[in-house]
Amino acid sequence: CAEGELRLSLDDSFRRAMNDNLNLKATALGIRYDDYTIERAQSSFDPALSFRVNKSNSESPNYTKYIPVSSIEQKSSSASLSLGRNLSTGGNLSFGAYNALSESNVESTKNYSGYLGFSFDQPLLKGFGKKNAYANIYLARLSGDATIRSVESSAISLLAQVERAYWTLVYAHQTLNVRSMALAQAESLLAYNEKARDLGVLVESDVLEAKSAFLSRKQ
C-alpha cells in the first residue's frame, strides 16, 4: 500500500458511506421526530391528575350599627382533586372531589361545603368510535412508516451508487496494472531487440516494430 493510499473493502465502503452521508442522517432524524409524535399522540389517553388549593382573607369596614364589630373579616379556603382520562371510544371519564371552608367574625359557626362528582361523556354521532379517537396515533404511525421507507430507499440508492463506484474503481485499478505490465514487457522487448540488433541477430525492422509496440502501450 503506497503512502497516502487508502485500501477499503466493499463493506468498509458501505459503512463509511452510511456514516458520512449527511442527507441520510437528516432523513433518519425524521424517524426520531415521528417516534416523539406517536408518544405525544398516545399521551392523550394517559390519566390526568389535578390538585388545587386556594386560600383567601378579606377585611372590610362595618357601616352598620347592627353588627358590633368595627370591621368584617372573612376567611375562606378550598381544595379540589380531579382525575380523568380520555377513552378509546372518543368519550371522557372523570372523577372529582371538592371541599371548602369559610368563616367570618360576624358568624358564630363555620361553613363547610363539599362534593364528590363522577362524569362520563360519550359522543354518539360526531367523534364517536375508536377510529376517531386514535386518528392522531394512526396518522403519526403512518408518517413514521413513510419516514422509515424513505430512509430505506435512500440507503439502498446510496449503497447501489457506492457499489457501482467501487467496482468501477477496481476495474480501473486492474486495467492500470495490466497496462503497466504490458508496457514493462514492451520496454523489455525493445531493449532485447536493440541488443540483438547490435549483435547482428536481428535487423532494424525488428527494433522499429518493438519500439512501435512500446510507444503504443505507453499512450
Image: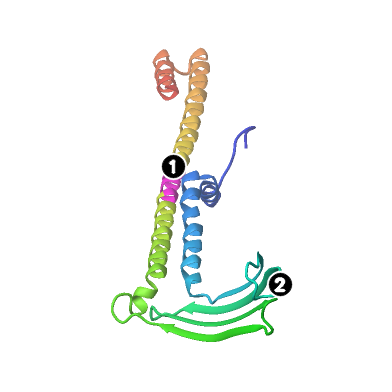
Residue 161: say if magenta: yes
**Residue drawn at 37 percent across, 82 percent down:** 122
Q: For the residue marked with disc 2, what is the amino acid?
A: Val
Residue in front for this viewpoint, 6 or 114: 114
Q: Quarter of the image containing the N terminus?
A: top right
Q: Which residue is mark 1?
A: 165
Mark 2 or mark 1, whichever is nearer to me: 2
**Residue drawn at 59 percent across, 84 percent down:** 113
Residue 201: say if magenta: no
**Residue drawn at 38 percent across, 78 percent down:** 90
Tell me residue 11's x, y (percent): 53, 52
Tell me residue 88's x, y (percent): 42, 80
Q: Quarter of the image containing the C terminus?
A: top left
* Residue 153 falls in image quadrant: bottom left
Start-end of magenta stretch: 158-166
Looking at the image, is 193 positioned above or below residue 75? Answer: above
